[in-house]
Every structure is written in C-alpha cells, then in structure tokens.
Amino acid sequence: MSQASNNKLFAKGWMIAVYTFLYLPIITLVVFSFNDSKLVTVWSHASFRWYEALVKDTALIEAVLLSLKIAFLSALMSVFFGTFTAFALNRYKRFKGRTLLSSMSSMPLVMPDVIVGLSLLLMIVSVQHWLGYPQKGLLTILLGHALLGTAYAAVVVTSRLREMDSKLDEAAMDLGCKPWQVFTLVTFPLLTPALVSAFLLTFTLSFDDVVLSSFLSGPGYSTMPMVIFSRARLGLNPTINAVATVTIIVVTIAVIASSFYTSYQERKRRREEAQAYSDTNK
Amino acid sequence: MATTAKENSKPAQDVLLRVEGLTKIYDGTVKAVDDVSLTVTKGEIFALLGGSGCGKSTLLRMLAGFEIPTKGKIFLANQDITNLPPYQRPINMMFQSYALFPHLSVWENVAFGLKRDGMPKDEIAARVEAMLSLAQLNKYAKRKPHQLSGGQQQRVALVRSLAKRPQLLLLDEPLGALDKKLRETTQLELVNIIEEVGVTCVLVTHDQEEAMTMASRIAVMSEGYFLQVGAPDAVYEMPNSRQVADFIGNVNIFDGVIEEDEADHVTVRCAECVHYVGHGVSGHSGMAVGVALRPEKIILSKEKPKGDYNWCAGEVIEIVYFGAHTTYHLKLDSGKVIKAQELNNTRDLSFGLTWGDRAYAQWNDLAMVVLTQ
Amino acid sequence: MAKNQGLLNKLLDGRNAVIGVPYFWFLLLAAIPLLIVLKISLSEMEGTQVSNMIDWREGWPKLTLNFSSYQFILTDSLYIKTYLSSIKYALITTLLCLVIGYPFAYFMARSPKHLQPMLLMLIMLPFWTSFLLRIYAWKTLLVSNGVINNILMSLHIIDAPLAMMNNSFSLLLGMVYSYLPFMILPLYANLSKLDLRYLEAAADLGTSPFKAFWLITVPLSKAGIIAGSMLVFIPAVGEYVIPELLGGSSTLMIGRVLWDEFFSNYDWPMASAVAVVMILLILLPMAVYNKSQAELSEGKS
C-alpha cells in the first residue's frame, strides 16, 4: 500500500475515533431511554416506560417550563445588551475606558462559572441588604444568564459587524439618513442573521446552565439542569435519559435544519454570482 | 498660492465649492490635511491626486461631512456647510468599492436617497427609471448587488449617488475595484454619464492616468497640502517641483547650476551635460536648479550628436520591452542612470542598440523643465 | 448654526447611549460583583449575616482588612494541594485535547471541501446539546455496573469490573470530552485558512512533507494553538460540574472547594478568598489569550 493511501487511512481512522468518542455517550443516552429495566445500564427490553414516567414527573416538567421561560427571556436580554456592547466596541474605536469595557465583556467568557455565580450572588445580596430588593428567584437567575449571554452575543454580533462594510453606514448617511435611520434601515436588516444565531446560542447556554442557576435561584425556582444535576449526583435515573432524548432530538432537528438552510442560501448566492459574471462576459 | 488668487477673481456665481484654510488634525498632532484652499467651478471635474496617506481621502470625507474639520470653512454655493451633517448636505458620494446595500435590490438602492427626502412615490419611480436607463441597467432593477458584475455594480453606485441630483458629486477611487481591462471602457461610460447629467465632481484617486483622463483640473497632494493645481497637461508638462515631476509619470532629473540667464534662454551646467533651455526662467545665474526631462522626449542614437548642448553619452545597461514602446536604461559616465523611451513604430525589433552598447541621448531645447523649487 | 449644533449634540448623545448602556450593564454585573468578592474575602466571618460584612453606613466602604481567609489558604496544605491539582488536571486536559484535536482539525481542514461544513456541524452538534446530560451519560457508561463494564464482562474480556469511575481517569475523560470542541474549533478555523501554496513552496525548496508540517504548518497555526489551549485551560481550572459528577471524592478540584465553602460551610469570606486566588491563577493565561486575540484581529484589519 502506498504512503499516501496509508496517510488517508490514518486520517479517516482518527476522525472516526474522535466522532465516536463525541457521540458514544449521546447514543447511549438515547438507547437506554427506551430500556425497560430500572437499572439504567442493563438492557432488558424496549419500552416507553420512562417517557410515561417523564410525563407524570411534574417536578421535572415544571423545571423544564421554567428553564424555557428563563432561556427565552435571558436570550432576548443577551441579544439586546450584546448588540450594544458590540456596537460600542466596534463602531467607536477611541473612547475613555474602552479597554475596561472590552475586558469586562470578555470576563464572563473566561471566568469559571463558580466565580461568576459567587460574585453575582454576593452583589445581589448586597443590593438586597441595601434596598430590600430583589429576592432571589426568577429575576436573579435571569440576570446571571443574561450576563453570560451578553458576552457570547457580543462575540457573535462583533464578528458580523467586522465583516460588514462600515462604508454602508456612511453611504446611508450620505443619501440622507439620520443616525437612527441608518440603524433601522441598513445596519439592523444586515445584522438580523447574526442576531438570530446569537439568540439561539444564548438560549442554549441558558437552557444548559446549572452553576449560575444554583447560586442565584431561590426557593421554588429549580431549573431543569438543577433538577437533573441533583438527581444525577444521587445516582442514575432512567427518567433523565428520557428527558435527554427529547431535548437531543429537538436540538438535532433544529441544528440540521438550520445548517441545511444556510448551506442552501450559500449555494444559491454563489450560483447567482457566477450567473452575473457569465452574463456580462457574453 | 498664485493659482488660488487667480481663481478667486472669477465671478462668484460660477464658483460652486469654495474651501478656505481647511485643516484636519488627528490626535492633536497628526496633520492629515494642512491648510488647504481651493475653488471648484460649476461643471468642473476636479481630481485630488496623491499617494496613500497624502490626505486626499480625509479632504473628501470633510467635503462629504464624515469628518469635522479642525480648522477652516467649506462653502457650497456661497453657503457655509462646514458643520452640516452628511445627511443635510446637497452633496452625494460614490464610494470606493461602492457600498451598495446588499439587502436591497438595484431599484431600492437607487430609490434609497429619494425616499429619505419624502418624495412622492410616482416621482421616485420615474426618477429611478430615468437613472437606470441612463446607466442601461433597467433589466437588472430587481437584482441584488451580489448578482451583478463589477462594472454593473459600479454604474449602480454612480446613479445612486446621482439620483438626488446633488449639487456636488464626490467620487472616491471610482475605478479602483475594477481590473485594468475593464477600467478603460468603464471610465468612458462614467464620464459620459457625468457629462450628460452635468454635475460638478470632486474625484479622489491615486492613479495618475485616471486623474488625467477624467479630470479637467488636478490637484497633486502630498503630506496634507497641494503641491500643484492645474490642467492635466500643465501638471504633466510643467511640473513646479521635483515631487510633482516625480509623481506624475517617469522623469529624469539632472542637478545643475544656471550659467547664462537670458530673457529668451538659459543654460544649465550639470555634471553630465549642459542643458540649453529655449525659454526664460525665473532665476539667476549661479542658482542651483534641477532639470526634469521625461524619458519619451529623449532620442537615442549610436552616432555622436553635433553641438555642445542637450546630449549625453552612456552605456546601455537595461532594455525593457513594453510592447508599444521600449525603455532603455543608460548609465552615464558620471555614474547616473537615466531612462529613455523609444516608440516601437515598426515591427523591426532590432533597434540596433543592445546591452553594453555605447549610446547617445539627445533632446530638443523645449523638452525639459527647469525646477527652481 | 444653533440648529446644527443641536444635531451635533444629538449625534454625540447617540454615541453616549451606545457606550453607556453596556458600560452600565457590565459594571453592575461584572466589575462591581468582583470588587464585592474582593471586599468580602478581606472581611471576617461573624456568623453568616451579610449585614456584618458589608457596612455602608459608616462611610464608603468600611474597610476592615482582614487577611485571615488568605492566611488560612496559605497555611492549610489542603488548599494549596487543591490548587496545584486543579492546575495539573487542567494542564493534562489541555495537552490531551491538543494531541487529539490538532490532528483532527488538520485532517478536517484537508478533507474534501464539500464535506467540511458537515464535519464541522458534527463537531458543533454536541455543543448544542446539554453539557450536563452528556456528562451524566458518561456516568452511565463508566460506573462499575455500567455499560462498558457490562459489555466487557459479558464478552469475557474481563472478569471483574474495571474501576473507571470516581477517579482521575473518569475526571480527565469527562474534561477532555467536554472541552475538545473548544480546542478543535479555533484550530480548524486557523488551519483551514492556511494557504497550501506555502507547503508547495516548501516542497519545491526540497522539504519533506513531514518536515514541512513542523516547519510551516505548526508555526503558522500558533495563534490557533494558543487560542484553543487557553479556551480549554482557563475554564478547566475552575470546573465544578465534571469533578462533582465524575471525579469522586479523591480528585481535588478548586471549583468544588469553593462550592462547598459556600453551600456547605456557609463561609462566604473563605469562598471569596478561594475565588480571588483562583482569579490570580488564571490571570496570566487570560492575558496570553487576550494578547493573541488582539494580534489576530489586528492581522485581519
């Protein structure tokens, strides 16, 4: 066998091994969610027993609903503040304290969750002591998730802003747009895809978070990851497999659909560009 | 500056744009534009020519309103617009690489500025149609910018900036994004459209050919100020300084001293030869000057020319073939290297000179410019 | 003229709002909280009442510097051991991710162009599904009566279950598993942009493919290596969930110590001091990361 085909074989093997490593646990989760046995790890026979248990598990269902609510609201907040951050850092290159803003905005990205959670909780407790408000609960979890999400959303929006020609803003102004019209008529429409992906990313982050929520939640506010975490700490629980399978299926469908959509758009665009060039060379 | 004084005496109604002592200082120290004054008359195409960082773009951006001048005033039709924001100026700009809105169709791009003015819908439609037919783009109206070729995008950008019928059109490197072959045809189309509309233009470019072919007047810029302002041929044939002579086209510069200084001629003694210049020069004998001589004004031969003036001898050290012409590099006895350009007016490529040959360069007494600055 | 001035002011106001909103947001939720952590780490435990720790009434702020928590950290060998072991695990995780991820990213960047979006999506997909659930899944695989042991035993490859759970093996496995995409993505972004003509030039100049890899590809992907390593190392140092679920009691990680000080011992000054020291430890890698990112974005423009 030749050297080149040996190399190719090695590359393929390596890639398959890594993908197996990444997907083995996910596949196991899904397979054993259909296992009838109470032991999560021993296969008996297929059943929907744990899905029935899941539907009756009101604590978990409530937690899922709370998580969805928090994820939706915090993603909205993240996109809002993240867009502001990205604009401040990219549209204004020189202002006092720019470095401070940029390092503050990347702090939640690099700080371990436990530190972010601890510091936010201590801040909220101080404010509470001072003003008697807010109580730990929905609002405090929201703030925590929105802080983390803002940092991520800022990264997503920034990368789009960088690609965008700042000349477009000037062209709009040159043609008679007042500054706010520049935003509504030019910048915002061009930014929409980035805002959508920032929303999806921060939604997922919030839906997934356990550490910040644990620090910031109060009695009566358990998110889905908090419930799963506390059960997983105690041991294995087939209902978790069932809820995992449901989320995995939803996410997979969403991700695959969106990636097909983007690659379709990209192909269409390329075709049209090629068409334009061949038109003019006729 | 002599030119400015002369222009200021023009009747006021002809002057569209007047710039007085315009200065832009960045970060308190960097002078991007340094005390520039200029006037542009109606219907003129005025080019700002210079290398990168010479301040031409900053000057243009101040005219458009994207930069606020540190000092100085801008008047458009005798109205002070120095502090007017860009969206209130009756000035439009065609941007470098066009800045077409990618999410809007060609039609919407052209209509964009008109809609901001609150023009009635049917008038907008009529104006956009007229603009698109001017640029022969009617059948592309529904397309998005990325579905157009470079030349088409360029025309959309042009008519978009013309749609509002601006008093002044600014063009930022209008042909910079096109490849060389496409440039020539596009340049003609561009000038035709501009002339048809009859709009006054200020054009920024680093390409001297673009400036010379499109503009009626050129300002050569360097380090934030104007080196020379004049018609293209005047700037080329009568540069007022070494920098201008050097920037516009190729040039050989001889250093020398004025010997005879008469009303109808001067002679300049250089290390390589003696120049006999067939017209008077504002200078005096004994003055150190430079003599600029363009390569295409030199005639090469193998025979030693007669007379004492306007020739020199050297060895051919390099021959560069360009197709339409050939450039010879001649190493003179003083060690100086000059370039001479010969037209290839026959298909016989063996001009007779080859590497290592001794050759004589000669020129007539009106070929060179004496640079006193 | 006055009208123009007003418009200029409006422009400036817009600018102030755009800068002011995120500034306020991050000051309130990022900077001030960290300062409070610092402040509380320097106060003394007097019961668990916060009111005793932060006293706003007697001037701002009533700073009774108290280093007892830090003293405790420095004298109690358990803390130092835990910090060192956190760094050790984070370093090993980073190295393993690099060793596994670099060839992977390299092969991915060299695979057929039309396959690359799909390969990339397959790397991102686990990232979109719950991290917690994926860690939990490893638990079901690794425990002594878990899936792997059951399969191996039923195939008679082993007689007694392997001890794969609640030790440094399971901890590292979980960490590498979770952070591998963070290594692969920046490396792939970097390697896929590598101009293949460099390698052709190297070959043309007489370099063997293996040598060209070390002399051209690796140095040119330095930015990706640094970015990936920092994205793995920094969060790995403070990881809490993975050691809690997979690490067992024998593996020492500082994130768990912080959690326990806070939630079990209610010792807020101690938890804060642990956090402050942790921040100091990751400050250097963070600076390295920021510098490499800044260089990257400068290179782009």
Image (cartoon, coloured by chain):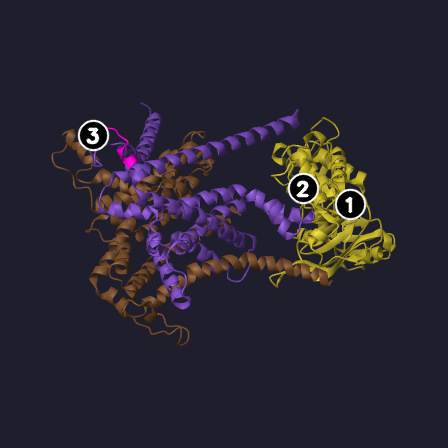
Chain colours: A purple, B yellow, C brown
Image label count: 3
Residue type at mark 2 is Leu
Identify the image quadrant of the C terminus of chain B: bottom right
Residue type at mark 1 is Pro
Q: Which chain letter matches label 1?
A: B
Q: Which chain letter matches label 3?
A: A
Query: Badge 2: few (under 14), some or many (20 or more) residues near its Cα, within 10 Å?
Result: many
Q: What mark, if any, has residue B330 been given in the picture?
A: 2
Which residue corresponds to the image point at 45% horizontal and 29% vertical from the top-left? C114
User: Could you say where residue A92 lies in the image, as x and y percent from the top left?
Assistant: 56, 55
Q: What mark, if any, has residue B232 been given in the picture?
A: 1
Query: Badge 3 is on which residue?
Result: A44
Residue contact between numbered discs 1 and 2, judged by CB atoms under 8 Å = no
**Which span is picked out in magenta?**
A45-52
Does the stretch in magenta take in A47? yes
> In the figure, is residue B125 to the left or right of A16?
right
Asked which secondary structure carries label 1, the reply is helix
